[in-house]
Amino acid sequence: MFSDRLKELQDRVRNAAEGSGRSAEDIVVVAVTKTVPVERIREAYDCGLRIFGESRVQEAVEKYPQLPEDIELHFIGHLQSNKVKHLPGLARWVQSVDRIEIAEKLAARYRNHGETVQVLLELNTSGESTKHGFESIDQAFEAAAAIVKLDALELRGAMTIGPFTNDEQQIRAAFAYLRGFYKRLQSAYPDHAVDTLSMGMSNDFELAIQEGATMIRPGSVLFGPRDSQ
Ligand SMILES: *Cc1c(COP(=O)(O)O)cnc(C)c1O
């Protein structure tokens, strides 16, 4: 049952939060629905979830117009320029801004639609070449400076995907690195609502919470294993 898995996740989030002197209410859960069919997303919605994540534009375009309008969809995958036009009216957040060019494209498209979009800067904190995201904090700061000048974009914080490893220290180090960047971003932009540190997936969300995540992105722990990524 989905409701059982959700309850178990919520218990684990609460334990991880309280174990590090935080409150579960301070952690936003984005339920990642890649490869999950519409009926099962609706089941999650009926259990009270409203915030969902998708990593492929095509899949989001096919599924989310069939779902209730009070859903807050987050785009979390690598974004190609030619796909940006599909996002206004569909995604309220883009967590995977990894170059200035894509920020500018998003700004143009959302402005035309009369909307704003909440954005996170994605950092590659693992050094894995298969991962997207800014390779350095300097590059990410340059993008932040460009983003705050774009009306249709609201700079909200930072996002990363933890390294694929069982080495807890390595995962924690990546998350701590992102937290360091996030804190600097907050000090650099005190007049902006920089309030979101998005890190932690099914395998590492407890570590992420211990390292300060304010948003986690579990998928398979809620919806079951995927056949392919
Ligand atoms: C797939 C994905 C997730 C969820 O992964 P799980 O391991 O299923 O929890 C989270 N964030 C991003 C960016 C993803 O692509």
Image: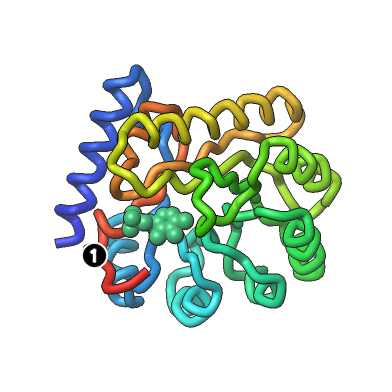
**Left or right side of 168 for 126:** right
Q: Which residue is mark 1?
A: 225
Above/below status of 193 relative to 21: below
Q: Residue at x 60, y 51 (%)?
A: 133
Looking at numbered disc 1 in the image, what kind of residue is underneath it?
Pro
| Quadrant of the rendered image containing residue 110 | bottom right
Q: Residue at x 33, y 68 (%)?
A: 41
| Quadrant of the rendered image containing residue 52 | bottom left
Above/below status of 86 relative to 153: below
The quadrant of the rendering that contains the N terminus is bottom left
Q: Residue at x 33, y 45 (%)?
A: 165
The quadrant of the rendering that contains the C terminus is bottom left
Element under disc 1 = loop
Q: Nearer the viewer, residue 171 or 37?
A: 171
- Residue 204 visible in rendering: yes
Outermost residue toward the right in this view:
149
Q: How is the image coloured?
A: rainbow
Q: What is the crowding at mark 1: few (fewer than 14 residues within 10 Å), some, or many (at least 20)?
A: few
Locate residue 98, reporting x and y percent. Answer: 66, 53
Image quadrant of ligand 1?
Answer: bottom left
Q: Nearer the viewer, residue 97 or 155?
A: 97
Locate residue 90, reporting x and y percent. Answer: 58, 69
- Residue 29 visible in rendering: no
**Left or right side of 110 for 194:** left
**Left or right side of 208 for 130:** right
